Image (spheres, helix red, strand yellow):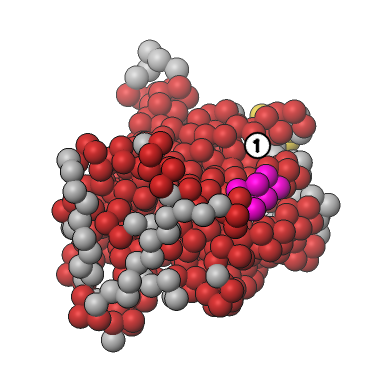
Amino acid sequence: MADRRLWIWVVLLGLTGQLAWTVESIYLNLFVYNTITDSPTVLATLVATSAVDATIATLLAGAASDRTGGRREFIAVGHVPWGLCTAGFGLVSVDAAASLMPMLDAVTIAVIAIVVLDRVMSILGSSANDAAFNAWVTDSTRPDNRGRVDGVLATMPLLAMLLVFGALDPLTRGGQWMLFFTIIGGATAAVGVIAWFGVREPRQPRPSGSYLSSVVHGLRPSTVRDNPRLYLALLAWAILGTSTQVFLPYLIIYVQRYLDMDGYAIVLASVLIGAAVISGIGGRVLDRISPSRGILPVAVGYVVGLLLMFPARGMLAVIGAGIVMMAGFMLGVAAISATVRNLTPLDRAGQVQGLRMMFAVLVPMVIGPFLGAAVITGADETFVDLGVVKQVPTPWIFPAAAVVVVLIVIPVVLLRKVGGAQTLAPKPLETSL
């Protein structure tokens, strides 16, 4: 019964959070590209500012949830305004900006409004999901099942994309952005209400010292020296994440505009389903061989997929390459995430989520999209849409991502060689779940 409750909430909260993040990380870019501006710099700025705010929010909320022990409150209460902010994206448009402030440039005002709303949404979402939910997962799992749990969680972003493509993509193609954002935002808020009554928390020790000391604890050099393997695993995550952000913000635009595939939803759905199945199976393998030992093999598969994407043009070729690429990426995330959980001190699960955001989100989302934008600008490929010349992403974003991820060899090799503190969370009490 306890395991069943765990899996129910892992899937429900994991999927709901990723539905909202799919909107923020992919569809918001598409919304801005289609309705406000085609500037890759604006898209990269959206991603980068969101990452900064999300990281700060996770550091603060994670430390607070460690001290109060109230993961449930952060999860449940945070989802409601998070959903409302997501719904609010549909209210922003160039026409609305022009009518409200006719004396100013409407595009600039619309961009500013989107950036501000995105930053608020990122703060709320990161407090509820990245800080509280991920700390709850660490509290509620064991070293012998974390590979499976993180394997499933790694599929959630792609399953969320699949659900959005299958059920809601026709709304975006029809320009019904307000309804699109309202549905996702409403679902996010509703799950927060349900979580208030359903989530149970395992009992865990709380950190000593002041709240401020908890916030900055993970940033101290002494903490790094005491936990070298934890920080090497986080560095590996930063490299994998940066590689992904070189192409991911531009992926749908690439498939739609560069490959010019009318059936792009079929392509993406096939890739997501195939990669999710492989990741789910691979999570069990990671538990058997140890997640840390699986990082390099799955990274190799990810690189192969990226290189296969470069020449892929036809539907079947793109599907095959995409499955290899995304399966490698998801299993890489699962392997690194489980490794980080296994190296997390018992009383600092929330605080480590802030570190995870710094390495897995902030660094990748500040560096990766701008690398991708530079590659796109350098290639200078364009197309004409209703008489307007627009830049389009090119296949060079994939080998550029492959070059970045090769650097993961350095921290992974050191992870195997360097000793250090490794605190493994004990099995939580059955009654607490």
**Residue placed farthest to the top in the image?**
103
**Which amino acid does the dot numbered 1 rest on?**
Gly
Q: In front: 381, or 159?
A: 159
Vertically, is 28 above or below 412?
above
Q: Residue at x 47, y 24 (%)?
A: 107
Which quadrant does the N terminus fall into?
bottom left
Q: Where on the picture, by quarter, is residue 423?
A: bottom left
Residue at 36% x, 36% y: name it: 220
Residue 97's quadrant in the figure? Answer: top left
The image shows residue 332 at horizontal and vertical percentages of 59, 60
Q: How many marks?
A: 1
Q: Which range of residues does the magenta coloring cover?
A: 406-413
Residue named by callout 1 = 372
Quadrant containing the C terminus in the rendered view:
bottom left
Residue 412 is one of the magenta-drawn residues? yes
Q: Residue at x 75, y 66 (%)?
A: 320
Q: Position of residue 389 (x, y in %)?
A: 69, 29
Residue 415 showing in the rendered view: yes
Kind of element beneath mark 1: helix
